[in-house]
Image: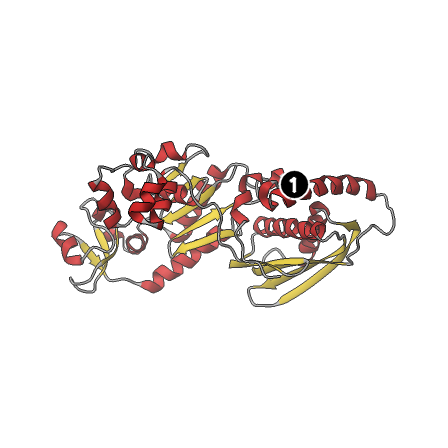
Amino acid sequence: MLMLFHIDLDAFFASIEQRDNSHLLGKPVVVGGPSRRGVVAASSYEARKYGIYSAMPLYKALALCPKLIVIEPHFPKYTLASKTFYKILANYSPFLEPISIDEAYLSFYGFEEYYSNLTTVAQKIKLDIQSKIGVTASIGIAANKVTAKVTSNYQKPDGLTVVAKGGEKAFLANLPIRDLPGLGVKSEEKLTGMGITTIGQLSKISPGKLELLFGKQGVYLSSAANGLGETELVLNWQRKSLGAETTFSFDSNSLSFLEQTLYFLSLRIASDLRGEGKLAGGVVLKLRTSAFQTKTHQAKLLAPTASTKPIFEKAKMLFRASWDLKTSLRLIGMSVFDLTTIVKQPSLFEQPQKITSNIETTLDAIRKKHGFWSIVPGLILDQKASLRKLSRTD
């Protein structure tokens, strides 16, 4: 089953200031200014106890808490911490959608053999963030973006909450409507005036009535309140003829991450081969380093194929032979060559390949009728929806 992570750095700007000045720890701190006429850019959790939140005018914040400590923003520090944040996430999965300077969605499409327990992965991510950035993060794990985002906020700060697939509506039911992402102040006031204060109450209103009251936002509110939402991440992947490549959000030298990327590219190329009724006789691997040096390597396959496994295994062999295990990469590309429509000469490897080919051909027929993502290998079953909306260039 599909599960997505929403990772959010806790009170980001304020936490960075507290990290760099121990005298600020445990005290009500806001980042903002430079004068009383400014607004709060971020507030520590100690300040939030006084009802102080982002975008509040500073003079109001000071009225609520006369002992409030106001720090002018230091954006270079925040930018550096954000870059580290995204590098950490990119080392776990290439399927990363940045949302803002301090939050992102993460998927583990096809990586189940590497990550058998996603809760353990989330705990490792939190530890990495704490040790490398010096702040805490909260993570929500759920089957769609909206629920994952709400979930990450559930046990802040330093929270980790998992909502099992099918339990979204029940989890959301008792939460206040203001917890729904995208619900504006005016819409909240309108719903409150109708006696609707919880997400569960909102879920009971018909979609048609909500659309009549709020327009297109009403459709979203109905869906979100019922635990539904987008499951697809916006990624940077391109198809190039019978090849595919991906440019990472951040350079990486993580062996597991890079080989996981090879698997996904192999899956797409094999699918494209079968769609065109072709077999590949060889694989080309393209690597681009963080210094923008590009190298290509190629090798023949034991027998022409349109199956994922032999293409992936050959690509992995090329990769391990050509990469030094330490140079950071910014792009991986793969393509195939020596294309044919039949196996020219039988070999010892033909029979098992033929069996696999028959299975994959049957799967292709199902996909042709119901869509590519209607059926996928068990290896990537949990994450099949996260890559359906990709930027493709033929």
Q: Name the residue nearer the viewer: 95 or 329.
A: 95
Question: Residue at position x 30%, y 50% from top?
Answer: 11
Q: Quadrant of residue 226?
A: top left
| Colouring used for the render | secondary structure
Q: Is residue 133 left or right of residue 342?
A: left
Q: Quadrant of residue 110?
A: top right
Q: Position of residue 177 (x, y in %)?
A: 28, 41
Q: Position of residue 38 (x, y in %)?
A: 19, 62
Q: Which residue is mark 1?
A: 366
Element class at badge 1: helix
Q: Is residue 371 left or right of residue 143?
A: right
Q: Give the amino acid type for the residue marked by disc 1 in the picture.
A: Ile
Total number of numbered discs in the rendering: 1
Q: Position of residue 178 (x, y in %)?
A: 28, 43
Q: Name the residue nearer the viewer: 209 or 390.
A: 209
Q: Is residue 139 visible?
A: no
Placement of the C terminus among the 4 image quadrants: bottom right
Question: Residue at position x 36%, y 33% from top?
Answer: 171
Question: Residue at position x 53%, y 44% from top?
Answer: 385
Q: Position of residue 126 (x, y in %)?
A: 42, 45
Question: Residue at position x 54%, y 39% from top?
Answer: 382
Packing grade of label 1 (10 A; few <14, some 14-19, many >=20) is some
Q: Name the residue nearer the viewer: 188 or 61.
A: 188
